[in-house]
Image (cartoon, helix red, strand yellow):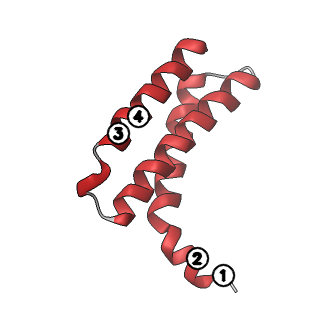
């Protein structure tokens, strides 16, 4: 578990270092995917499931949420 978390943090650090030439939506997608993958891995490990499957599902959900974030914010009161 510690190895997976270290890998996720290292990947997030490397990914955010290259964000200078990205659009805000692309940056939000990347951030959402990284946060979702880390959260999914943690939840997968806590509930006794597979952290890898949790990371995959969380990453996909986070990327989708990051991509739609501006549209979501526009529709909030």
Q: CA distance from mark 3 to mark 1?
A: 30 Å
Q: Earlier in the sequence, mark 2 or mark 3?
A: 3
Q: CA distance from mark 4 to mark 1?
A: 31 Å
What residue do we see at 61% from left, 36% from top? 40
Can you say which quadrant of the picture contains the C terminus?
A: bottom right
Q: Is residue 49 left or right of residue 7?
A: right
Mark in the foreground, 2 or 4: 4
The residue labelled by disc 3 is 15
* 2 and 1 marks in contact (CB < 8 Å): yes
Q: Which mark is residue 7?
A: none
* 3 and 4 marks in contact (CB < 8 Å): yes
The residue labelled by disc 2 is 73
Expressed as whole percent of the image width and height from the top left, the position of residue 49 reads: 68, 22
Q: CA distance from mark 2 to mark 1?
A: 5 Å
- Dot 4 crowding, Cα within 10 Å, few <14, some 14–19, many 20+: few
The residue labelled by disc 1 is 76
Picture mark count = 4
- Dot 1 crowding, Cα within 10 Å, few <14, some 14–19, many 20+: few
What residue do we see at 70% from left, 32% from top? 43
In this view, 38 is above or below 61 = above
Q: CA distance from mark 3 to mark 4?
A: 5 Å
Q: Earlier in the sequence, mark 4 or mark 1?
A: 4
* Helix, strand or loop status at disc 4: helix
What residue do we see at 32% from left, 41% from top? 17
The residue labelled by disc 4 is 13
Expressed as whole percent of the image width and height from the top left, the position of residue 63 reads: 46, 52
């Amino acid at each position: 578990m510690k190895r997976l978390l270290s890998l996720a943090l290292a990947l997030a650090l490397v990914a955010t270092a290259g964000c200078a030439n990205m659009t805000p939506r692309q940056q939000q997608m990347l951030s959402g995917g990284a946060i979702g993958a880390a959260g999914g891995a943690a939840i997968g490990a806590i509930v006794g499931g597979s952290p890898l499957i949790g990371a995959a599902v969380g990453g996909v959900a986070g990327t989708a949420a990051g991509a739609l974030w501006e549209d979501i914010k526009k529709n909030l009161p």
